Amino acid sequence: GELLEHTEYCGNYYGTPKQTVEEVLADGKNVVLKIETEGAANVKKMLPEAVLIFILPPSMEELSRRLHKRGTEDEETIQKRLKQAETEISNAYDYDYVIVNGELDAAVNDFVSIVKAEGFRTGRNTEIISKLNKSL
């Protein structure tokens, strides 16, 4: 019960501490989690107001090139990651937004735009609306 989500990904185990996320949210701040699709689905179940953004590579060839260029993993691990990516891309339809990470600055701008737009949602501003309504 101490993890918001957890999973095994390409032979490694990952998880997000629930208390940390709750504390940041209680401070009125956004939380950004870099997690795989199973974890994202679990977060959405626990926090239905969560906004899911799927970051897509421009192509599988480019993803392969980037993984190889890193030089941090052996070929077997890279192939596992590519196979996992193929599986996960089919889950992009379940997300609220999709960003194609072709050019980094553009992808960052897209991400910032989504965060800003979500902050303007009526449901996220009910307190100020109510306050203004009461002053009328």
Image (cartoon, rainbow, N blue to C red):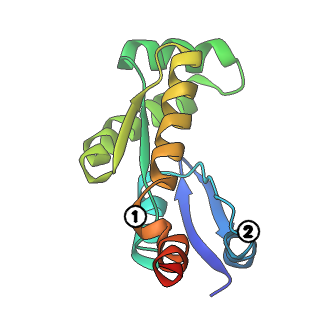
The correct choice, above or below, for 28 with respect to 72 in the image is below
Mark 2 vs 1: CB contact within 8 A: no
| First-in-chain label (2 vs 1) | 2
* In this rendering, position of residue 96 left or right of residue 93: right
Q: Residue 41, can we see it? A: no
- Please give the count of numbered marks on the rendered protein: 2
Q: Residue 51, can we see it? A: yes
Mark 2 or 1, closer to the camera: 1
| Disc 2, SS | helix
- Residue 128 placed where, x, y %? 55, 71
- Residue 54 placed where, x, y %? 41, 42
* Quadrant of residue 53 within the rendered picture: top left
Spot the residue most to the bottom. Answer: 1
* In this rendering, position of residue 15 left or right of residue 131: right
What amino acid is at disc 1?
Thr
User: In the rendered image, which residue does mark 2 sit on?
Assistant: 24
Q: CA distance from mark 2 to mark 1?
A: 21 Å
User: In the rendered image, which residue does mark 1 sit on?
Assistant: 122
The quarter in which the N terminus is drawn is bottom right
* In this rendering, position of residue 135 left or right of residue 133: right
What amino acid is at disc 2?
Val
The residue closer to the viewer here, 109 or 52, is 109
Image point (47%, 53%), residue name: 120
- Residue 97 placed where, x, y %? 36, 43
Image point (64%, 77%), residue name: 3
Image point (42%, 58%), residue name: 121
The correct choice, above or below, for 84 with respect to 128 in the image is above
Image point (54%, 63%), residue name: 7
The residue closer to the viewer here, 16 or 25, is 25
The correct choice, above or below, for 50 with respect to 112 in the image is below
- Residue 64 placed where, x, y %? 47, 17
